[in-house]
Image (spheres, rainbow, N blue to C red):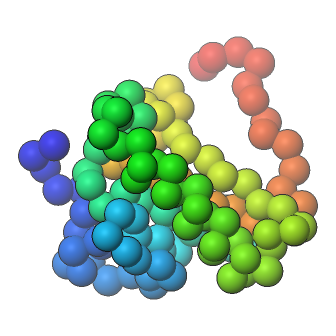
Amino acid sequence: MSEETIFTKIINGTIPSKTVYHDDLVTAFLDIAPKAEHHILIVTNKPIPSVAHVEAEDEQMLGHLFIVARKIAEDLGVNESGYRLIVNVGKDGCQEVPHIHMHLLAGGYLGGFGFPHDKI
């Protein structure tokens, strides 16, 4: 991946963010347009465009996304009450930034998914 994404710039500190977690593999920060009381993006530090581009060598890093999600949920006090993890893939999956990331949404009942009946 040759072009820097907004997430790469956040990881590198070029763009400021409200970071809630950072280590060698992933970085987590508050979403600028939250869809729930708590909306945190957990991104891989390695810039992979999407799940469609994952290689076997990425397995540990991608598993680490879930470990970090659990830690953040514990820190927020929602580990027992529940939260939602979302990974969008590609245009039809509504992925907006071509850099693997997981949304952690929490803070009350999140409702259903609202899947469309027909593709528009």
- Residue 48 lies, with reference to residue 61, above or below; the image says above
Horizontal relation, residue 104 to residue 50: left or right? right
Report which quarter residue 84 is drawn in.
bottom right
Dividing the picture into quadrants, the one containing residue 49 is top left
Give the residue drawn at x 51%, y 82%.
20
Q: How many marks?
A: 0
In the figure, 72 relative to 69: above or below? below
Compared across the picture, whether 47 is left or right of 37 comes to left
Give x and y (percent) for residue 6. Answer: 28, 62
- Which residue is rendered at x = 37% and y = 74% of the image? 23
User: Residue reaching furthest left?
Assistant: 2
Nearer to us in this view, 86 or 64: 64
Quadrant holding the C terminus:
top right
> Whole-percent x and y of residue 90?
42, 31
Residue 2 vertical placement versus 14 (above, below): above
Q: In terms of depth relative to the viewer, which is nearer, 13 or 69?
A: 69
Q: Is residue 36 visible?
A: no
Q: Who is closer to the viewer here, 93 or 53?
A: 53
Query: In the orientation shown, which residue stands out farthest toward the top?
Result: 118
Percent of width and height locating residue 42:
49, 62
Image spot of residue 1 (x, y percent): 16, 43
Any part of residue 86 in sight: yes
Residue drawn at 77 percent across, 18 percent down: 117
Residue at image coords 10%, 46%: 2
